[in-house]
Image (cartoon, rainbow, N blue to C red):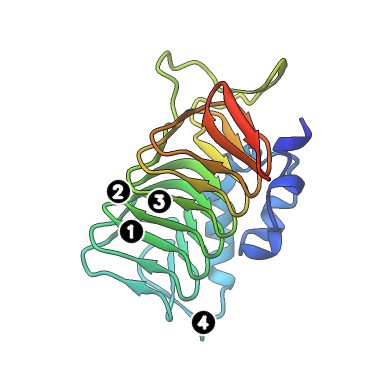
Amino acid sequence: MEKAKISNLYDLNETIAKDYLAQFTYPWEALKGISDFIKKLGPTLDKEKFEQRGEDIWVAKSAKIAPTACLNGPLIVDEEAEIRHCAFVRGSAIVGKGSVVGNSTELKNDIIFNSVQVPHYNYVGDSILGYKSHMGAGSITSNVKSDKTLVVVKDGEEKIETGLKKFGAMLGDHVEVGCNSVLNPGTVIGRNSNVYPLSSVRGVVPANSIYKNRNEVVEKQ
């Protein structure tokens, strides 16, 4: 399933987790180890640029953190990132350089690449969001199937058993997700693709596409 490989989704130079992600073929393979990776990386960060703000929480001195934001570890907030009013970081999260975690947005077990925007009422769980990806207001990743079975990534007739009960979405670089969309468990969206507002997305969306609905996914012109 070439479309879903890390090499086809992400520029790994745009995340502090570059060396970690480089170990894997598919991005969801990294989900189980995010917490341990943060705990190992955190103590090695440059103390001139980062400060420790509690157990397993490292925040860049140049980052902007609203006093009403809730930060739980393990967590790394990279340089120039912004975490706004009433954001809730539940832990096991990396927030990339210059990224925005907005008001009332919740993060859990995520790698957020550099310059990502999740600015308004988003839930992002068990997911990886690529460089300069953006989730419109109210869009969320649904990370558990309603029947609680393990998540399978599907691309037409091709299927990959992930062995994961919790798996949100893998967004490639420069992906735009429209307002109030739901990315169902096991969603993978290729680089430079757009999702219409109010969409319910599942499976693999090719790179350079416009997702209008499940029956209409067109190539960008």
Rendered residue at 30%/64% (across/down): 84
Q: Which amino acid does label 2 sit on?
A: Tyr
Q: Distance between the residues labelled 4 and 2?
A: 32 Å
Q: In which quadrant of the rendered view does residue 26 lie?
A: top right
- Residue at the extreme bottom of the image, as rendered: 48
Disc 3 crowd rating (10 Å Cα; few below 14, some 14-19, many 20+) is many
Vertical side of 67 occupied by 182: above or below: above
Q: Distance between the residues labelled 1 and 4?
A: 26 Å
Residue on which disc 2 sits: 121
Q: Which of marks 4 and 3 is nearer the N terminus?
A: 4
* Image location of residue 139, percent across then percent down: 38, 41
Q: In which quadrant of the rendered view does residue 123 lie?
A: top left
Decide which of 168, 54 is in the foreground and name it. Answer: 168
Residue on which disc 3 sits: 91
Q: Distance between the residues labelled 3 and 2?
A: 18 Å
Residue 188 located left or right of residue 197: right
Please report contact status of discs 3 and 1: CB closer than 8 Å, yes or no.
no
**Secondary element type, mark 1:** strand
**Secondary element type, mark 2:** loop
Residue 109 located left or right of residue 90: right
Rendered residue at 73%/44% (across/down): 24
Please report contact status of discs 4 and 3: CB closer than 8 Å, yes or no.
no
Q: How far apart are marks 3 and 1 (CA)?
A: 16 Å
Between tags 3 and 1, which lies in front?
1
Rendered residue at 56%/29% (across/down): 186
* Image location of residue 179, percent across then percent down: 37, 43
Between tags 1 and 4, which lies in front?
1
Q: Which amino acid does label 1 sit on?
A: Gly
Residue on which disc 4 sits: 47
